[in-house]
Image (tube, rainbow, N blue to C red):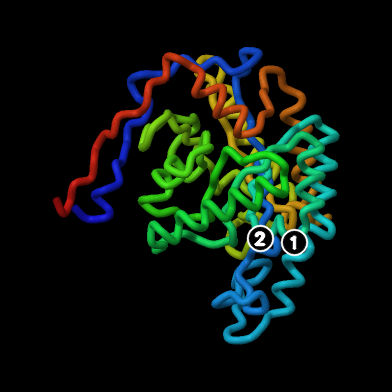
Amino acid sequence: MTEAAAVARNFLGYRGRRPEVCWPGNARIAVSFVLNFEEGAELSVADGDERNEAVYEVRDEVIGAADPCMMSHFEYGPRAGFDRVLDLLEAHDVRATVNTCARAAERVPDLISDAVSRGHEISCHGYRWESHAGMAPNEEARVIARTVDALTRIAGRAPVGWHTRSASTVNTRRLLCEHGGFLYDSDAYNDDLPYVLQPVGTPHVVLPYSFDTNDMRFVPGGGFVFGDDFARYCINAFDWLYREGETSPKMMSIGLHQRIIGRPGRIAGLERLLNHMAGRGGVWFATRAEIAHTWRAMSNLPPWKAQNRQTAGD
């Protein structure tokens, strides 16, 4: 069997068997804000990595030498963007999931402690800010363990969530379950609701993430220019899911980056979005751990069965 055929694909999801979702307070929609804490974990020759990160406000990779320009760009997040974003979330009584690269946390542990003190969840975003595509299973298991150990030490509690930068491997979910302690991962982009799998042992929740309701679209070619672009797009998505949620409650993920939405020319877009959501009843702002715990507790939601398995190469 090929590697591709080893991954069970499901193209139907909940079609034909609408789950009886009941969010706390009978909310129509569970809204998950995710602050990606990556600065200092990006690839950098100056840090001994094999290459430099190439994407930020521009696309320009320096090869074979340290890149002070790119390093300075990433420093903006913890220096200026972090407090700007967290203060705004706090003003709206919204707790986020801080999706944290462990190497970034090791460089500024006080910021992670601050996030914990404000009630935010600390979850795993890998050790370095890197794709896991092509990683051997034993190497990936070491990365998972190193990430968990570092974040547990810094945050004072073990993380229960994982999200790989872009590409995971066919082994990632199994390795998370074998490591133990993980409630959920966000390595999927295929639904507006969570689902449960059971690759190893106890049920494991998958919380699909989103690259469209995400400030990463401010990067070159992403389509967002002004803060209002982010607000308008996310408000449109929220309003549609909120409407559907009257009869079938939904979940919405919103991706933030302190070095991106935390810029003064963009932060008003986040403020507009928060004001719009806060003006509606039936909205549950929750961390991903809270959503995963709630979902797994719903007894009418058995683990998904693999449908439409791709078997080419068998």
Q: Secondary structure at mark 1?
A: helix
At x 85%, y 34%, the residue is 91
Query: From mark 1 to mark 2, how far is it between C-alphas?
Result: 7 Å
Give residue 275's position: percent from left, percent from top: 78, 32
Give residue 247's position: percent from left, percent from top: 51, 15
Q: Which residue is mark 1?
A: 107
Count the numbered circles shown: 2
At x 51%, y 19%, the residue is 297
Q: Nearer the viewer, residue 173 or 275?
A: 173
Can you tell which quarter of the image residue 233 is in?
A: top right
Q: Nearer the viewer, residue 25 or 281?
A: 25
In the rendered structure, the answer to whether residue 281 lies left or right of residue 23 reads right
Q: Residue furthest bottom?
A: 64
Can you tell which quarter of the image residue 40 is in?
A: bottom right
Give residue 104's position: percent from left, percent from top: 69, 59
At x 30%, y 46%, the residue is 7
Residue 109 higher or lower than 273, as above or below: below
Give residue 176's position: percent from left, percent from top: 46, 44
Under mark 1, the amino acid is Arg
Q: Nearer the viewer, residue 194 or 163?
A: 163
Tag 2: Cα neighbours inside 10 Å, few (<14), some, or many (≥20)?
Answer: many
At x 32%, y 37%, the residue is 11
Under mark 2, the amino acid is Arg
In the rendered structure, the answer to whether residue 265 lies left or right of residue 23 reads right
Q: Are marks 1 and 2 in contact (CB under 8 Å)?
A: yes
Can you tell which quarter of the image residue 49 is in?
A: bottom right
Tag 1: Cα neighbours inside 10 Å, few (<14), some, or many (≥20)?
Answer: few
**From where the camera sits, is residue 221 visible?**
yes
Q: Nearer the viewer, residue 49 or 74?
A: 49
Q: Which mark is residue 242?
A: none
Q: Secondary structure at mark 2?
A: helix
Q: Which residue is mark 2?
A: 103
